[in-house]
Amino acid sequence: MIRTIALREFKTLFLSPLAWTILAIIQFILAYLFLTQVETFIRVQPELATIENAPGLTDIVVTPLYSNAAIILMLVTPLLTMRLICEERRNKTLPLLLSAPVSNTQIILGKYLGIMGLFFIMTLLISLMPLSLLTGGTLDYGKCLANLLALFLLLSAFTSTGLYMSCIAGHPIIAALGAFGLLLLLWIMDLSTGIKDQHSELFEYLSLLKHFQMIQIGLIRSVDLIYFAIFILLFLILSIRNLDNERL
């Protein structure tokens, strides 16, 4: 049943122009930023040749690409997740879905995996840009895979948050704004750590940006993986609990 719901949600996304439009816009923006970084690398390459242990192609082009993708997708994810449950409620189809012989866990996981299918394709399309550099240069494959992992984990966290906001909001726009506000708060939460005498270990741990950047640089720690696992599971469980209340 989870697979059936996921496939239905995935197909529904591509039956509307929204998914195609977002894919095209994101690819266009990131391609422009990617080519800008490549041009910057070509310009500074003679200077880098004279510096010992200078940053390479991966550090100057690939890592900024995934960082830019993370910020853009933080804006886009709420738009794709806002209708998952909220639209079912507005169209009066949620009671029908809840009365079907499927559990709330299957409904939530099915919708979650359906939207993650789109983000998986999006991540692969973004990763084609760095691979194009192999025609004229070399890449640090370890850092490239670390960036890919970091972006996918981040998108998984974004999606779980957006799904939960779609469960509790009464209108898709409210769900999108709520998800974006919460994600932005968690993204900038560790800004105080850069201020003298304002260091907070709690804010640093809760910050999405901090854990994303640690994986990006190739430092894959268990604390970061556990953070994303807990984050995703927490919002999925909250979503399931919310549907439990609706079913009652």
Image: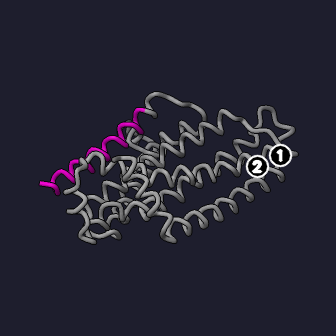
The verdict on residue 95 being magenta is no
Q: Which mark is residue 31?
A: none
Determine crowd level at label 2: few under 14, some 14-19, many 20+ residues with C-alpha closer than 10 A.
few
Q: Position of residue 11 (x, y in %)?
A: 46, 60
Distance of label 2 from label 1 (alpha carbons): 6 Å
Where, quadrant-wise, is the C terminus in this rendering? bottom left
Q: Residue at (41%, 58%) from the top-left corner?
A: 9
Q: Vertical placement of 61 versus 32: above or below? A: above
Along the viewing direction, whichever of 152 and 18 lies nearer the viewer = 18
Q: Amino acid at mark 1?
A: Thr
Q: Position of residue 179 (x, y in %)?
A: 36, 59
Q: Vertical placement of 241 versus 218: above or below? A: below
Q: Amino acid at mark 2?
A: Ser
Quarter of the view holding residue 105: top left
Q: Vertical placement of 88 versus 218: above or below? A: below
Q: Residue furthest top?
A: 222
Q: Position of residue 211 (x, y in %)?
A: 48, 39
Q: Which mark is residue 135?
A: 1
State which region is magenta: 226-248
Q: Tell me, yes or no, whether the two marked residues, 2 and 1, touch with CB atoms within 8 Å.
A: yes
Asked which secondary structure carries label 1, the reply is helix
Q: Which mark is residue 132?
A: 2
Q: Residue furthest left?
A: 248
